[in-house]
Amino acid sequence: MSIVDKGKEAVQGVAQAVMKKAAELAPDSLMPGGRPDPLIRRQHGHIGKPVSRVDGPLKVRGAAPFAAEVALDGMAYAALAYSTIAKGRIAAIDTAAAEAAPGVVLVMTHRNAPRLNPPPRFLSGDKAAAGDDSPIMQDDRVRWNGEPVALVLAETQEQADHARSLIRIAYEEEPAATSLATVSQAAGGCEVGTFMGEPLRAVVGDADAALAAAAHKVEVVYRTPGHNHNAIEPHAATLAWRGDELFVHDATQAVAHTAWSMAQIFGLEESQVHVTSPFVGGGFGAKGLWQHQVLAAAAARLAGRPVRIALSREGVYRIVGGRSPTEQRVALGADADGRLTAIIHRGVTPKTRHSPMPEPFILPTQSAYASETIALEVQTCYLDMVANTFMRAPGEAVGTVALECAMDELAEQLGLDPIELRIRNEPDKDPISGRPFSSRNIVAAYRAGAERFGWDRRSPTPRARREGEWLVGMGCATATYPYHRMPGGAARITLDADGRARVDVAAHEMGMGTATAQAQVAADRLGLPLEAVTVRYGDSSLPGVILAGGSQQTASVGLSVMMAHQELVGELLKLAGNDSPLAGLRAEEVESADAGLRKLDEPGRFESYASILGRAGRSELAAEGSAPMPLETMHWSMHSHGAMFCEVRVNAVTGETRVSRFLGSFDCGRILNPKTAASQFRGGIIMGLGLALMEETQFDERKGRIMNRTLADYHLPVHRDVPEIDVIWTDIPDPHAPMGARGIGEIGITGTGAAVANAIYNATGRRVRDFPITLDKLL
Amino acid sequence: MTPFSYVRAADADAAVRHSGADAKYLGGGTNLVDLMRETIERPGTLVDVTGLSAGITETDGGGLLIGAAVRNTALAEHGLVRRRYPMLARAIVAGASPQIRNMATVAGNILQRTRCAYFYDRAGSRCNKRQPGRGCDAIDGFNRMHAILGASPSCVATHPSDMCVALAALDATVHVSSADGERRLPFADLHRLPGDAPDLDTVLLPGDLITAVELPPLALAERSTYRKVRDRSSYAFALVSVAAALSVENGTVTDVRLALGGVAHKPWRASKAEQALRGQPATEAAFRVAAAAELAAAEPLRDNTFKVELAQRTIVAVLGELAGVEVTGGGA
Amino acid sequence: MGVIVNGTDVELPDDPRVSLLDLLREGLHLSGTKKGCDQGACGACTVLVDGQRILSCLALAVQYEGRSVTTIEGLGDEGALHPLQQAFIEHDGFQCGYCTPGQICSAVGMIEELRRGVPSHVTADLAATAIPCSRDELRERMSGNLCRCGAHNGIMDAIAETYGAETHREAAE
């Protein structure tokens, strides 16, 4: 990071700190969410109904178009060649054979690539999208093993792939930093990591002294490896220039960010770039702006042809970042009653100089437990490797592994039930910021989960239950993920003369059921039947800068639609005029119901939308609204919560672990659609099972190269690894969140790894602190 | 994929006629097509031999003759295989996925190449199997999946097949056609240890075509099984696998067949363990001694030391299962 | 003779490198069959050839001359969903929808294998001619189809409901 960048981050940090203080001190009523969303009170609408996905028929027929499936006339196919050294320069590059190969349209290298501005690194600006701000094919430098060094365009993919294999490159290799141990242990090798401009560090009291004095303590080191998202759809884009306008059919979690960022890179106005992404084949944090879209657009410009770039599975590993490994030391001190007196959570994780943030594994510990003293810190060091990036619950997914396993270790030492230990340390306000919780019912989630799971059948003594070759055990852990809402939310509602509504919002669908859940919410908001509402999304020309990330899309869209609805009501009242039963009413005096507006305390004063529009001779009426700054997140401590329960069977002969039962008991506010929500919870949990038992990116430190870059070598859970997963929830609305709903997309992966590990300990008496827990560690 | 020409052979003679220095026989394509896409294999001609014999017939002696083009699924579901050679049926269905088993042929399965990640990484890693003399990046790299028996300083790769482990245990014979005529060779002699020529997976010469696999009659095999240990519960290559057949009379082992997968450059016939077992009491203690005898020569690498213990435990457990003797596990 | 795709005779590609998957997606614009890994490791490209499920990414199109290929677009009747497709919607057997066509084609092929008595890794009795349609069998037999969104439970429910499998909920014990 340059000094300028550091300065920028520091300014960003100070500004945020000032705003936070102001938001903390302000009265509730001035905050977004200060007055509960009126939809929270409505109990008989579409919200809460298990509606099947509106795009289900398209998806099951394979008719939902993904980015690599848009056909453009005259399209050429791209293939990328990747560097095979971690650091150095390209000394020579021979493209003659590739250029002469059949069907080749263009070979692009740093020698002929158009000059491009650096990609705006994610978090460096409101609409910055790039996961990596390295220059893209602009010089002969090699920055990581796997960096694109050449692109071939050909008439067919087969021809492009073959020509790519004919390119010969000679490198001048330079010493590279590729070993976490070497770099992190060198003097000055590490520094405190920053996240969103603030240091990843928190201190309350003197935790080291409190730990030394504690009656009971555990001090342990947990290690988690790198992970890759491995969405089944590899990254792809199909794009074309029309004059100076760029049209990109992308697979992205950030259409608006991508349009702006591509414009920056190519020196265009934002309005000259159009990004559509109606269906994303899984994202999990990885589907952002990486080099492939930029390279394809550059090549398309050079060749004067539309281009399809569909990364190979190896290509995804080479240029799209994953989660970094972590080494976390957790120390807990407790008094004789099991009340925490010290929480220490420190450790190290590598990042690159070009990625947005280090893996912030201390995040879940910030609001977890009451303790007299707390010391949290993420140290980071810089490696020459493919950029690390956000992967489902960055921080929490692996941070809960260390924290929640350590809690299990402490419970055993105290002779306390692990749930009881957690309940004893339940904080009444945020332990670090001191802010009140907006809504926190984790104890209720634990109690409901324990009863349903049969926790009382767990033996506190490890290795107490054996069935044939199989040792059986149970474990639990806390899940947590913050409520986020990012600035930039906006949406438009368009009513037509038949009383149908369309919501336009630059949101995304990568499996969450966006169109379905948002149609339910909008229908309730507008007092319309579900069939009368459509949601248009996945297009940068629509309103809003809304990231499908941080589990915040639902809140951001929900509040934006709420604001658009307020505007719409005002416009409708104006349009209704003096001949309407609504004449003279102000927006605060009416509500939407029965496909029209009615006076709140006098339901008889009603006029339908169709009637209002009809009388005014309007075919449609549109209103746009913008969400206010997300000050609520600085006023309350807002988090989704969960209690995870796991039963495992560990084979005493071979060490193989099978998860036989799992229950997630969640407290995430109001659940908008139980069917799609259950799927999201389960999906997170299953990714957590992978994290616990098999997932590991094998980074060969000798060359800085990822070796298991296939789905045969990087193991994801298969059907047989996945038991029936039970999910329940409190369904207690958060009074300060839009619709009363907090995020649900990421929390499932949190706590799961620890629940599995704790169950394995209960089954075998083996405490494995090095993830994933493969069978060799249990032999 | 490097350009190639494609021909379909109507029979073995035609296939052999089409073969040349630059040709490869193509079965189900489940390994070769992948390797061609990775440009590790770059044949000038592909001779499609899926039209060759896909029959399974009983031999005069009561064995089975299995055509080279029989698909893996067809072999596993065949009544005689299930009844007489259950370890073979079990080994096949432990491998890959059903879709792949529907495509893969018997000969193709036998001739599949290692899954060593350094072998696959043509652009970025050294591999003596790909390029003899270049060096091996696996020996000091990620080698959890690699060999503990019979490896050499030039190669520590493993053979990934499950089916072949059973064929090794069953004393199968391979029928081979070439321009020089037909010959048969014991399955155990087909695959090589790497030595200083790890580029050669088998003793077959260019142009040699596997036309069939023959299983001898083996009453013992009716009481046989296959156990595979891997990093997830399905669709993963073996860390260790064991194919075993056992005959016990009056508490004494009268005969045994034992082979291991995931431990060597070839399907590993555990002859030492077999020898140690014959005539011994069918007890856990004797099984342990036999397993230890087989693994005594193991030379594990950085990441696969566990395989030495895992292989022994799995052998003991499988023999225990076949003998109906309860074993205590590995002491875990 | 070419290859028959969903009942239509289609010309084989001139370039023998073209996989059946790329013939479908790029040549015929039948993009319902998905490319997830292009190396036989995910199952997203599963199609039926003469009723048998295979991975179209590892299949060279020229090898399938005269064979009959059914893709997700060819399942079910004109305009109506296949019962399994309907069940996938009902049980939320997908999220992003990318692995879905492969899961569905795989399940259609799988159930034929089960009815035919093809054993699996979890089949206890190899001699048995009828194999129970248990959750364990279904899970094992569908393990060649990866899903990263984690729709596994819904997929199993959809298959079990459609093909009348035992549906006891193991989690309830």
Image (tube, coloured by chain):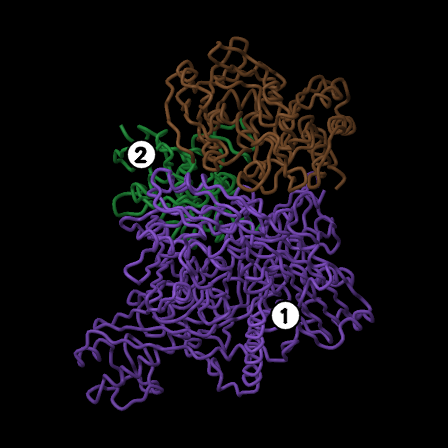
Which residue is rendered at x = 68% and y = 27% of the image?
B150
Q: Which mark is residue B149?
A: none
Determine if residue A88 is in view. Answer: yes
Helix or strand or loop: what does disc 2 sit on? Answer: loop
Q: Chain of mark 2?
A: C
Which sits in the foreground, A698 or A489? A698
Percent coordinates x, y for residue B192 in the rendering: 62, 23
Height in image: B281 above or below A634? above
Same-chain check, marks 2 and 1: no
Residue C13, numbered circle? 2
For badge 2, the amino acid type reads: Pro
Q: Check the residue under mark 1 and report the chain it is in.
A: A
Q: Position of residue B24 (x, y in %)?
A: 45, 24
Q: Which one is nearer the viewer's eye here, A444 or A64?
A: A64
What's the colour of chain C in the image? green
| Residue annotated with mark 1 | A200
Q: Nearer the viewer, residue A736 or C5?
A: C5
Q: Looking at the image, which residue is at 57% across and 44% down? A: A708
Q: Is residue A469 visible?
A: no
The image quadrant that residue A427 belongs to is bottom right
Report the chain shown in brown: B
Q: Is residue A498 left or right of residue A629?
A: left
* Residue occupying image coordinates x 36% and y 77%: A625
Report if the CB atoms under discs 2 and 1 are less than 8 Å apart.
Answer: no
- Distance between mark 2 and mark 1 Cα atoms: 57 Å
Tell me the kind of residue under disc 1. Answer: Leu
- At which x and y percent is residue A54? 35, 59
Q: Secondary structure at mark 1?
A: loop
Which chain is tinted purple?
A: A
- As displayed, is residue A221 above or below residue B246? below
Where is the N terminus of chain B found, in terms of image quarters? top left
